[in-house]
Image (cartoon, helix red, strand yellow):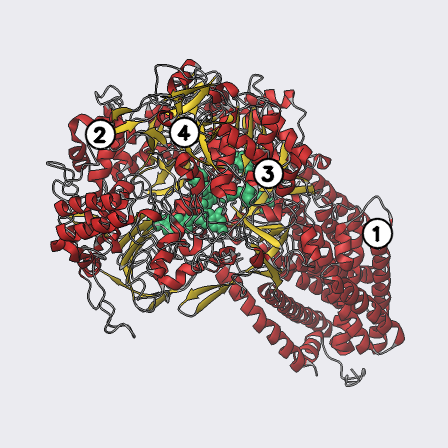
Amino acid sequence: MTSLPNANGPMLDEAQAVDKYIWRSPYAKQIWIVWFLLLGLGLIGMYQRVTMGHMPAGYGSYVPWGLWIAIYFHGVGIAGGAFVVGAMGYILGARGLGTASMLRTVIVLSIAAMVPSFMAVWLDLGRLDRAHRIMTSPNFTSMMAFNSWMYMAFIGVAVVTWVLSFRPRSTWLKPFLVLGIFLACLIPSQSGAFFGVVDARPFWHSALFPVLFLASAITSGAAMLMFVRAALGPQAFRWASMDSQAEHDEALNRLRIVVACGLSIYLVLEFAEFSIAIWSPASHSPAIEMILWGPYWWAFWIVHLLIGAIVPLVLFFFTHRRGIWAVGALLVAITMLTTRLNVLIPGQSVPELKGLQEAFHHPRLNYTYHATAMEYLVGLFLIALGMATYVIARRIGATIAVRLDKETNGNKKK
Amino acid sequence: MSMDRREFVKAGALVTASVAAAGALVLKDRLSTTTSDPVGEKTVRHLTVLNNIKPQHDEDVLLRMQRELVKAMAKPVEERRWIMVIDTRKCVGCHACTIACVAENKLPPGVVYRPVVTEEFGEYPNVQLRFTPRPCMQCDNPPCVPVCPVKATWKRPDGIVAVDYDKCIGCRYCLTACPYGARTSDFGHSYLEGASEGASTDDDAATYGPQAPWADAPSHEYGKSWDRSDHQSPMGNARKCHFCLHRLEVGQLPSCTTTCIGRATYFGDANDPDSMVTELITKNNVQTLLPQHGTKPRVYYIV
Amino acid sequence: MSKSKPMSKQDAAVLSRRRFLAGGALLGSILAEKSLAGESPDHGAAGSAILNSDRPDAPYELALSQNTIYSACLQCNTGCGIKCKLQDGVVTKIDGNPYNPWTLLPHLPYATNVEDAMPVDGSVCPKGQAGLQTAYDPYRLRKVLKRAGQRGENKWISIPFEQAIKEVCEGGKLFASLPGEEYREVEGLRSIMALTDAKVAKAMESDVKAILDEKDKEKKKALVAAFKETHSANLDKLIDPDHPDLGPKNNQFVVSWGRLKDGRGQLYKRFATGFGTTNAHGHTTVCQGSLYFTCKAISEQYEGGKYANGQKFYFQSDDEHAKFILFIGANLFEANYGPPNRTVRLTENLINGHTKIAVVDPRFSKVASKAWKWLPIKPGTDAALAMAVMRWMFENDRFDAKFLANANKAAAKAAGEASWTNATNLVILKDGKPGKLLRAADVVIDGQPVIAAETRKLADGKEFVEKFLTVRVNGKLTALDPNDDKTPVVADLFVDTKLPDGTHIKTGLQILKDETLTKSIADWCEIAGLRESDVIAVARELTSYGKHAAVDMHRGPAQHTNGFYNIFAWMCVNMMLGNVDHKGGVIAANKWDLEGKGKLFDLKAHPGAIKPFGISSIRHGLDYEKTTIFAGYPAKRNWYPLSSDVYEEIIPSIGDAYPYPVKALVMYMGAPTYSLPAGHTNIEILCDLKKLPLFISNDIVVGSTSMYADYIFPDTSFLERWEFQGSHPNMPIKSQPIRQPVIAPIPQSCTVFGQKAPICFETMLMGIAEQLKLPGFGKDGFGPGMDLSHPDDLNLRAVANVAFGEKPDGSQQVPDADAHEIELLAQARRHLPSEVFDVARWRAIVGEKMWPKVVYVLNRGGRFEDADKAFKGELHAHPYGKLLNLYQEKTAATIHAGTGKSNPGYAVYLPIRDYHGNEPTELRKGHDLALITNRTITATKSRTIADPWLSAITPTNGILINPRDAEKMNLTNGQMVKVVSATNLKGEWDLGAGKKKDMVGKVVFTQTMRPGVISFTLGFGHWATGAADITIDGHVIKGEERRTAGVHANAAMWTDPAQKNTCMLDPVGGSVSFYDTHVNLEPVR
Ligand SMILES: Nc1nc2c(c(=O)[nH]1)N[C@H]1C(S)=C(S)[C@@H](COP(=O)(O)OP(=O)(O)OC[C@H]3O[C@@H](n4cnc5c(=O)[nH]c(N)nc54)[C@H](O)[C@@H]3O)O[C@H]1N2
Ligand SMILES: Nc1nc2c(c(=O)[nH]1)N[C@H]1C(S)=C(S)[C@@H](COP(=O)(O)OP(=O)(O)OC[C@H]3O[C@@H](n4cnc5c(=O)[nH]c(N)nc54)[C@H](O)[C@@H]3O)O[C@H]1N2
Ligand code: SF4
Ligand code: SF4
Ligand code: SF4
Ligand code: SF4
Ligand code: SF4
Ligand SMILES: [Mo]
């Protein structure tokens, strides 16, 4: 990070900034390598999915949902969280988040998180060819239909705000942002409800989930925002309409606090949820026992608690190096996925009727789930897809911004 | 900066509007009672089944139930109330019903409508075995239905919870919603997987080779013809027990019922006060599975 | 072949009808009105009979009569009636045939119109439903395979049928291309068939009989010398001129089978007689042999002054009417004959309190789970338990004294009984040992014989001297003719006295009672490892329902070295209950005759048959002592005067060339290597080209025994062929389920006697017969005008015989099928090639008169009496109705060839013993677990492994063990262990050709096992039948992983220390020992 070009470099316009610091930033090579790696591996998975359908997948009929659905919920969480934080910042005019172009980067980020999420559920469907029916003949008593529509609405609002962001003086921008924030908050909580309504899975059937999901969404959303900014450095966000390194730092600092708080709140809620199950003799929860001491105990203790919470918090509060913060933010943003998995899988792995697995044998009729290579590879593809979406969308946005800017300035000249 | 009054009003308006819209949509589907199923006169079936076989006092309960079935089919669908009664005291855990169902509905590997759960209790020499067949409970309050995003599964007027494979997108939400694990998804497996690799199937071959004509034949679920070959539905769909609607239609009992060697499975119309099933559920103190889930099963167990 | 064949007009018609129906109702006219072409009432809007959608409705093909053929299952030997439902000529669903009493209770009246019956489905077990997967098994053979490697190496080439026939008949250097066999001359069947002159055979046969019947050694020698004189011209036709009783060289051709049913049975025996070999042996003794042969001994009839003509059969309970049944080692709901028919007759009665059952089994079986009491007996001690029960019955007078007192037919009739026992007949004891029955004419009381001997004539005209049996009536010695139906003799039950001349006599019942008194009830229970209180409770219950109580037993007590006497003891309990032939008691099987002798088509007629004679290769039906090869005791191998079809002797006797070497063997539908205890001993012999020069097998796949053959002829499966399933003892209804071609044959076609037919068992035999010109085949095979040139010639005539009925006057014929039915027969078979189904040909075979009746029978899947005809009042309408031997003079006269001691003629408890009469204490040392085996509903030996549906329910088996034992040995649930015994310390199958398979299975904890006893289910751990790679014509067909799952521990079962290449066995009843071995479990990592 030290190798960042100094903060008082030449003034650039947004497009140039994007070009210079994303396409051709000092990390461009690394970014490209990572991206092509993700894409290459991802395509292998996609090839398998396309040619072999669900055959190479690990989910079945007793554990119907696996990694992809977790990715989906994680993705929409990031999208929602990032939007809430970013838009709030804009409305409140927080330093470093207050400019239209900043707002755009937020919107773009949240859309870039949405796109792969949708892709994930779509690939999970038994009949890809009929995905459109959710839109054409929805059943709104279904959280799935309801959410899909809401996400569509959100994306719509996001796009509107994105367009309006080019007209910062419009009196519609903020109202739509508010609506966006409203929907964005609903998204994670509805995701929680998505599980909450499933009475068949005692572990899911919990009022706490919506709140938990919201907390984790804000956290991972903010974390992702923070990572992107920290990683790309002030320059990538520094152009005519925006000022110094200081402001950039300010923004990172704020985000850091948000992430830290979000994380803490999440842990507290989680503790509440688990402690009830563990200490109240009445409600014993095999699912929670599975999370804490099951075959995937490490996902909770190591990945989620250690790498996903303790380490980042340490990084946040024991160093001032932005780069380190970036690492911390990334850890949070990624490891939150395990919390999704730890809601999804254990909830399904506890049969209500004992003995079914022995009554009729097949790998798909199994209460244990292990994601397969194909599922992981597709996961990588989705990340690559997200990155691409982000960059391309930002580039387009930048160009438009510059055009408009030129026009207005041009007019001024005359 | 922050928001001025005008912006506040607009924001408020937008939010309320969308909440209202959402509410309306949900309410519409929650309250909607209209059935998409054929009802009334055109569902009445005047079947001649068993007309010429005169009832004997000691006839097999299969015949008695089939007569009652024919009687019920003469009523419009909305006046039938199909239920199943399983007498676990008579069940010998033979799995004939499981296989009958697999064969009748051409179920691929990993898809099962009626497994039979075997449990062992106690300690030698005071040991006991219990067998619990588990078809779909055709719940009166089926959690699998409201979760379906595309209205591909619903409760019929006769109480059967149906799936339209042509509508189902295979999201598997309903699988997670069923506490009984009564729904399984057709992932496209074949019972031939791994058999006789390297053998030819041409006319002069020395062995029959990897072919399973019985698996390729179309199934008759819901009175339609379903051919899974080249990935057509029901491949990719959620599948479940449907009380053999297609057999009821022609005056035949569900396949698991006719093949029950213990005569432990009873099927009939709960709206018919004289039917075997009505008699059984009134005479015995019957139970349902996982009542705590409030699903109101239409399958009863005598224990 | 099921490969898409051009669509016939009929198909087209049906298809177009389908399309038409697609518009409307789901069902063809058929159910609505009776016409094949009829219109269908249009219900509902098009495409929405059940659910509204754009997808059109389709007719429910499986309910259409023209898509249905009734037949009989053979996934297990129960042979339930099945209803095969076809879609475009492919069976896709198998249900129960409602005309058949196995699948519906009561079954539909026989007169029911076929269309009226069509919508009714009966119930069959999961195996039965999965049968179609056995028929369409990808590993099914279509061409003859010839060995192209070592025996057992699984390398094959496929050859034309004609070539195969020629090679096996003419022999030569058949395998010259194989290393080591370049110069091996294989003797063909033609040269083995040395004796071809029927007249000579006839003469030799009676002279050999004379030699055997001669008791005096010297005179025997003289007779042999005389024989050599008279037959000097033909001595070269004999195996050994010095031992003419070994018979002709023809005997060196052995034909054997595993599962053989009527129709094919008649053809196979015709083939053997046509060839002139006495060696045609089946698998009974691996199955429940001693159950059969004890009942045979019980059913020996007093004729010509001695006991003869016992029938090979057994009794089972009338499940539907019994009020109490004691099941001994009978696995009703998982196996037996069989689940569908026996379960439906019990479950309702069990819950409504009509019936109570108790189960004697070391394993808590599914039937035990419905029982009032479970007696977890120690394996092999069933007779001890029976002794305890009988002692209690004697001491508490809880037995049917009235029934036992009836000494002859007249008495039985007078008492309203159908059968009677010899319980009261007086037996002579020589120094305490019961032997012959006392003959009245021999008893002289104050100068007067009790009765004068009479000279009488037998049915066949032979004269004999009748000395009469003896009973005591109110203390007075009385002569007895048990068959006398005029003057009832009701005799004293208990007699123990001396005749004036000091001869010690007792009644049979007295002998039995005294035997039960040799130990206290407590001691008997101690032996059986049961609580006395439980045993007495069961005895009391058993004797609380009069004749409506029964003891039903099967393999559990039968398959031990003491099997004969276990069964004997329990059958005595039935006799003491007086329940034989009674409603709710024990009954015998009953089937419609198909041989037609003296009625319609005489299928026994065999012009020019070469009368087989000589000692059989398994030494059965004959006393060792009578033969010229008698050489003292112990004999090299056991002899079986009282039993037959001794499966465990067929191949090991070939191995020992005792009594003579065998040159060629045919094995049909049997896998002794897999199914026999210590079956691996057979593999070693089968792999030995010198001991067995030519081995021909008939199988549907490369099986666990056929894989060792030189030639495998493919067969048609049970869905492609004819057979007559017959019945089982628990079925009161007189039945004859008929197995008929349902699908097009999988094997290719061949030509025999100028007619095209599928390659199968029948054509294999007929091909050989044609090549060797065997009498009784081809033109006029059954006599003038009655050819046997196509399998249908036999089978369709057999159907006609069934349709004709038992009455020679034809008064029992079935009605004619109406026009609709006759059309239906053809419609339903429109997918069958003409080599299988051809109306003209079929009509011609049975003739115009019988044709409509044959159709009537085939359209109902056989012939079944109506349910209400099964009983006449309290008696079975088709009773056994004869003398029952509670004491067996004939048995007492036989000598155990391994010990030289005579066999007891009454029920006793014997400990487990080897062939030399020693208890296997050595073998038990260090092996603490008793090994048994059992069936599960989803598996048979070698058929069901082909069925993936069943694997979904039972993908594998395991070692069932009580956690108490497991924990002692610190084994954990699910861990893999090797089964080792004193005679298989390696715990492996040696499969020959360098292949081995470990006997490793996973430990399954279950409280259902008696501690100290472990079990495994039959049907897993396969090494053939699709489980192994096979190479045909140079390219490899991969085995299916799924089929190798689980463990088959037969190779751990003891080989007899005295008869090293054979399992332990029951020297009297012939049964193999399945439940006597002790083993150890060694953890494998
Ligand atoms: N599913 C299935 N059904 C079948 C068959 C099949 O292969 N599979 N085969 C058919 C054939 S060929 C036959 S012969 C019949 C056999 O029918 P069964 O004989 O009824 O069936 P098995 O399971 O062999 O029964 C043996 C029973 O005896 C018990 N047993 C073992 N040792 C002893 C003992 O020392 N004393 C007593 N009292 N019991 C003991 C075993 O635990 C087991 O329950 O089944 C027929 N039906
Ligand atoms: N461990 C254990 N072993 C047992 C028993 C047990 O209870 N436990 N039970 C015993 C009993 S009761 C019996 S009856 C025996 C039976 O033992 P076997 O009489 O030897 O019968 P299977 O083992 O069924 O062998 C059948 C052979 O015939 C072939 N086959 C199958 N169908 C057909 C056909 O349609 N045509 C022809 N030509 N061949 C065919 C199969 O591929 C296989 O090679 O098993 C015995 N073995
Ligand atoms: S049992 Fe399950 S699938 Fe069937 S209706 Fe009830 S919830 Fe739905
Ligand atoms: S799987 Fe099909 S039926 Fe089930 S919820 Fe999804 S769309 Fe509806
Ligand atoms: S009713 Fe039909 S679909 Fe349902 S379990 Fe029984 S056979 Fe299967
Ligand atoms: S068929 Fe009947 S007896 Fe057999 S398992 Fe099913 S319900 Fe039980
Ligand atoms: S019991 Fe089952 S396998 Fe045996 S014959 Fe009957 S249906 Fe077939
Ligand atoms: Mo058997």
Query: What is the chain letter for disc 4?
Result: C
CA distance for labels 2 and 1: 90 Å
Between marks 3 and 4 in the image, the one whose residue lies nearer the viewer: 4
Image position of A181 (left or right of C724): right
Q: Mark 1 to mark 3: distance in Å?
A: 32 Å
Quadrant containing the N terminus of chain A in the rendered view = bottom right
| Amino acid type of the residue that numbered disc 2 sits on in the rendered structure | Asp
> Mark 3 to mark 4: distance in Å?
65 Å
Q: Quadrant of the C terminus of chain A?
A: bottom right
* Label 2 secondary element: loop
Under tag 1, what secondary structure?
helix
**Residue that carries the numbered disc 2 in the rendered image:** C460
**In this rendering, the label closer to the viewer, 2 or 4:** 4
Contact between labelled residues 4 and 2, with CB atoms less than 8 Å apart: no
Do tag 3 and tag 2 residues touch (Cβ < 8 Å)? no
On the question of residue C853 being in view, the answer is yes
Q: Amino acid at mark 3?
A: Arg
Q: Are marks 2 and 1 on the same chain?
A: no
Disc 3 element: loop
Q: Secondary structure at mark 4?
A: loop
